[in-house]
Image: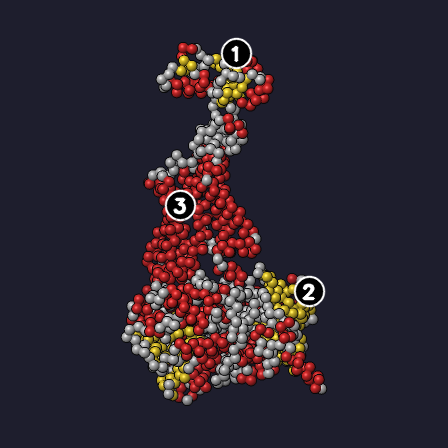
Amino acid sequence: MVSMVETQSEGQQDLQVGEILVDAQNITKHFPLETGLIANMLSRGEIPSVKAVDGVSFFIRKGEVFGLAGESGSGKSTIARLVLRLLELTDGKILFNGIDLHSLSMEDMRHMRSRMQLVFQDPLASLNPRMTIGRAIEHPAQIHFPKLTDDQRKERVLEILEAVGLVPAGNFYDLYPHQISGGQRQRIVLARALVTRPELIVADEPIAMADVSVRALLLDQMLELKDNFDLTYLYITHDLATAKYICDRIGILYLGKLVEIGEINLLFSKPLHPYTQALLAAVPVPDPRMRRTEPLPKGEIPNPINPPSGCRFHPRCPYAEEICSKEEPLLRELKPEHQVACHFAEKFV
Amino acid sequence: MADPKTKDIEVSPEESRWKEDLEQVGFVRKLFLARKWYGADWWLVSISAIMVLGFLMMAVFPGAFAPYGPHELVGPRFLAPGEVPEIPVLVVHQGANISSLEDYARPSDQGRVPLGVLQGLPTAGALREEASLIDGQLKDRDDDLRLRPDIIRFDTRQEMLQAIVDGEVEGAVVQLQEFEKVAGDYPDLELAGSISGDLSTQGGFILGTNEIGQDVFSRLIWGTRIALIIGFSASLVALFLGVPLGLLAGYVGGPFDRLLSLLMDSLYAFPGLILAIAITAVLGPSVLNVIVAIAVLYIPTYYRIVRGQTLSVKEEVYIEAAQSIGAKRGDILWQYIFPNVIPSVAIIFSVNVADAILTGAGLSFLGLGLPPTIADWGIDLARGQRFIQTAWWMITFPGFAIMLIVLAFTMMGEGLMEIFNPKLRER
Amino acid sequence: MQEEILYSIRDLTVSYHTRAGDVVAVDDVTMDVMSGEILGLVGESGCGKSTLGKALLRLHTGLAEITSGELVFEGTDLMKLAPREMTNIRGAKLGMIFQDPMTSLNPVQRIVDHIKETILAHEAVSELVAEQRAGEIIELLGIRRERLDDYPHQMSGGMRQRVMISLALALHAELVVADEPTTSLDVIVEAKFLDLLKDLQEKFNLTILMITHNIGVVAEVADRVAVMYAGKIMEIGTVDEVFLKPKHPYTQGLLSSVPNIKLDDKDLYHMEGMPPNLLDPPKGCRFHPRCPYVMDKCRSQVPQLTVIEGRQKAACFLYEEVKAREVVNG
């Protein structure tokens, strides 16, 4: 068993469970649209952009599963990539164990990657079709632990394969991704993510493409791995039922803004933001006795290039009043550890 | 606990799935499995592969295929394919101990040797030519031997042959075939040797001879060598320059990419042959310069294909995955992008070789690039052009050879393209 | 809801002829679709539900072939119809909507033209009438009439799905086969779409076959549900019967493995194994390698769909025992 000491770089504090691992402060990401020269001149410098993430703040505690949920255009996948610095921030800060990620040099950031990994939605697409499983899992280890001998590295890979339940591990080593059955592919991706013993795993819809009958096993396995490997998860999803099962805390996103954030069971049983309420009501329940009775908000998700003024949900909100279109509500803590961005959230408490 | 049936290839009823599997399997195994799946295309590739192999054999071991050397003068000029050359032979009295014209050389004071020829045939000319040739050589020697035959004309063959028997002439020149017909009637006479040309060419030459008496077929075989050398070398040089540039441009992007693409597009837009002509004109004739000229022509082809592939592979999720594990940019380019881009290159290569051979032949047809000491189809085409009416075989067969080799490589490349990457449709 | 059978599927078998071998995607399926109901067809990927849906419209392309069975729609066996007659029915009485509306709609054609074309292809009416009808239908589906002039890319996903339905409705379809219609939609849009389907069912007595892998969607909207696995129907019954008293072990496993947002702290059931390889399916009951109640019989014999209780049928040998005991006990 290779020593865990290797995973710790100098000067890193050993975090206790419950302390803040990831601190996202007012993060913003705008994607500028490519327009012609003339259009640029005409718009007088104001380049239209997709405001994918706009001033979002949250923190993730060590050892927890923090969820980010939302529909399309909510910005959840963008945030996932900002946290891992696969995209550059337009504004704001992301602290990882106290380190400002986006101020690091590219080379330093590269070394940081051993401590934070991404699990993708489509496992087959995220594996290099021309690389064997063994090689794919080995590669992160090779990059971040160059002092390992070939044998040590291989041993580490086999260990990880066993840890994710792919046994006998040796069988998988020389196979190519397309030779692995669907249910096992996501585990390969997990194995690759775990080989450097990261602290944070960002999972972007990790079970969405797995067969329904296999999802439960995957979810429980992820929870087990979290305990065994001392992990923290940022879990991105649009499937609230799954989020409820696996997440401890959750943030609800709408059009690039966080509208509600808190402990998941409490939040789901008593949602304080009209959008959260609508979302929860809309989720299809596998029980015919619990069919939805609540009405749904009118309209559709607006274009993120030109989001509504004030509260972004106001055109669709059944409780909207004048102030909602003028003033953007900020996240306020209405209950312990439960924040809402709504001018009238009190009435739901 | 789930049982990992690891060797199961998951199949769903969707028809595209088996194609996906096929794509990922190793190259060689794919070739053999492919027959079951690809029917006609597989045959296309196999047949053309055999042809290519044949050409390669000819280029590496020309001696095994070609009866003569590339510059060897083997017989009369302008001999049609299969046409039996008229071989004038010397017929002498048995026991005369003569095996060739040279044996008639005698000291200048001994008089001239009487030799017979038939009236009105070119054999007289051949005899005279041969004799003066030998005489010229004898003059240079110290001894006093000379060959100056006294040429006596006869009206009929019988008279002439009878004259040898009677001793009126010491020998006579006859066509080999004619003599063989009547040899039985003159048991006292025997064949001494041929006046000019080789007795072994009795069967004629399969594809005829050219304007200076070289065997067209042999030159064809020998010409394979230079064609393939130029074709492969030029393509390889273009590949080794175009592929890395394409990879870099596609991956790095930005002004580097734009500048390079501008350059490449300009090169690409140029009519190929004209560019090659310009370069060889500047550099001068030599095999190396021809290779360089043609290579320059094809660098943009590889560049464009690889750049396009790189751009699309760059957007794949597994590239983002490679970034997320902290791989260096060089690693990503080399271990993740390159292996996924290479298959398309291998296929383009085959078609490219065909193209290069064609361009090379075109250059040498125009008289550019290759020194005339090399046997080359293009040069043969040029030489045959003047005699297209009278000696059509001089230009036809080299032309045919070019066509065949280009076809072989192109078919193989296209066939492989169909099998491995039907999405790719660029030249 | 009437008790009239609209579409009767009998002994339907559909095979794919791949070069790796024959894959039987739908294996001897017998099922009735009642007039005016929403019938859910659930199963995981590869179970054959999409193939079955397309077979109802005889829409198979490429390698798939209906090798046997009868498709009796309103009394006529569609298998016996000539291609021309089938074309008349398809699109008119039988409609279909797919998962990704973007690929089903012509990107260079306006919405109004899509609908008009569909109407004009089947009915001899004037263009003006067709255009008016298009406007009416669109509004019925909650889209403003002005949007008729839009191109597909100018509309959102949810709207495009509504356009797809409008194509079916334009010709007064009696049965619409919806293949994963909400899988690519956001949750709220999905909920609205399901409401729309229920609305159409009520207003027009529209019969809908809802094919999906999302059992929540089925529970929200369907009247009856059929559970499909490896090409066979494992269980069929009303939503109450199947969801609240599931009989087949696969259904039971599936229901217990899906999280329910309204329940707290439920442990999820792990189903063993994986969906089978249809090139070489398990002998006997297709589900037996993963079944917690597997008996010897299951490995060699194929259970038939038999009535268990009320309208509920399941294909499982467990209930033979039960039935046998019932008979013995009187």
Tell me the subunit letter for badge 3. B
Task: Look at 66% across and 66% down and name the residue there.
Answer: C68
> Pointer 2: what residue?
C80
Q: Nearer the viewer, mark 3 or mark 2?
A: 3
Q: How many marks?
A: 3
Between label 3 and label 1, give the one nearer the viewer.
Answer: 1
Q: Secondary structure at mark 2?
A: helix
At 54% from the left edge and 29% from the top edge, which residue is drawn? B203
Tell me residue C46's x, y (percent). Answer: 56, 69
* SS at badge 3: helix
Describe residue B190's horizontal placement relative to residue A334 as left or right. Answer: right
Q: Which mark is residue B167?
A: 1
Same chain under badges 3 and 1? The reply is yes
Chain assignment, label 1? B
Q: Residues within 10 Å of mark 2 (few under 14, many from 20)?
A: few
The reply to whether label 3 and label 2 mark residues of one chain is: no
Residue A320, percent across and down?
Answer: 42, 83
Amino acid type, mark 3: Ser
Identified at 37% across, 19% down, the residue is B141
Q: Which residue is mark 3?
A: B233
Q: Amino acid at mark 2?
A: Lys
